[in-house]
Amino acid sequence: MKTTEKQRIANQLAGYETTSSILWLVVAIIQILSVYLIIAGIWNLFAAIGGFNTATKIRNMDPEVPSIFEGIIWLVIFGVINFLFGGVIGIALIVFDIWIRSQILANKNIFVPETKKAKTIKKTTKKASKK
């Protein structure tokens, strides 16, 4: 895959993550303003800020991106908290985040640096020639 195609995919994925972060920020602000949901609001505020940071890593094709999305427990915890305190909107956003996660993991090859790919190819070639 060409670098321009990888960058296009990374930009698209970063856009999804940014959209998710904006939506979580809106939910967080509403929750914080409604006082009785302030704890969930603060939780969502930190999640939104983290999402903006992750979007930057995605856009830069940082090799650590797939590992950020491999675990699912954070989505489960996030989903339970938002189900209890955020209702339908929280669940809808969790579904969107799960979809983003699947897209990141389906395209995790774009986050592997070219130098690492070249080393892997050399190792594979050496092993094949020894047989």
Image (cartoon, rainbow, N blue to C red):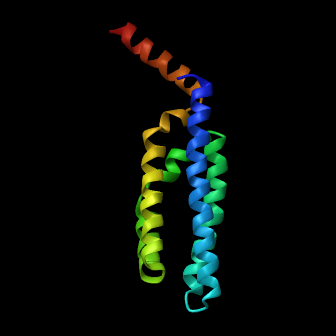
Residue 49, by quadrant, is: bottom right
Give the residue at x 55% y 36%: 9
Residue 28 against residue 92 in the figure, above or below: below
Left/right of residue 107 with respect to residue 34 in the rendered view: left
User: Number of marks in the image?
Assistant: 0
Q: Residue at x 62, y 53 (%)?
A: 54
Q: On the rendered structure, is 26 left or right of 97?
A: right
| Position of the C terminus by quadrant | top left
Q: Nearer the viewer, residue 29 or 120?
A: 29
Image position of 73 with respect to 42: above or below: above
User: Could you tell me residue 24's position as x and y percent?
Assistant: 58, 68
| Residue drawn at x 58%, y 82% as measured from the top left | 31
Give coordinates of residue 44: x percent, y percent.
58, 73
Q: Which residue is located at x 47 percent, y 70 percent?
A: 78
Q: Position of residue 98 (x, y in %)?
A: 43, 57
Q: Position of residue 41 (x, y in %)?
A: 59, 79
Viewer-nearest residue: 24 or 121:
24
Q: 52 above or below 65?
A: below
Q: Give whichever of 19, 67 is nearer the camera.
A: 19
Give the residue at the far left of this rendering: 131
Q: Is residue 71 above or below residue 105?
A: below
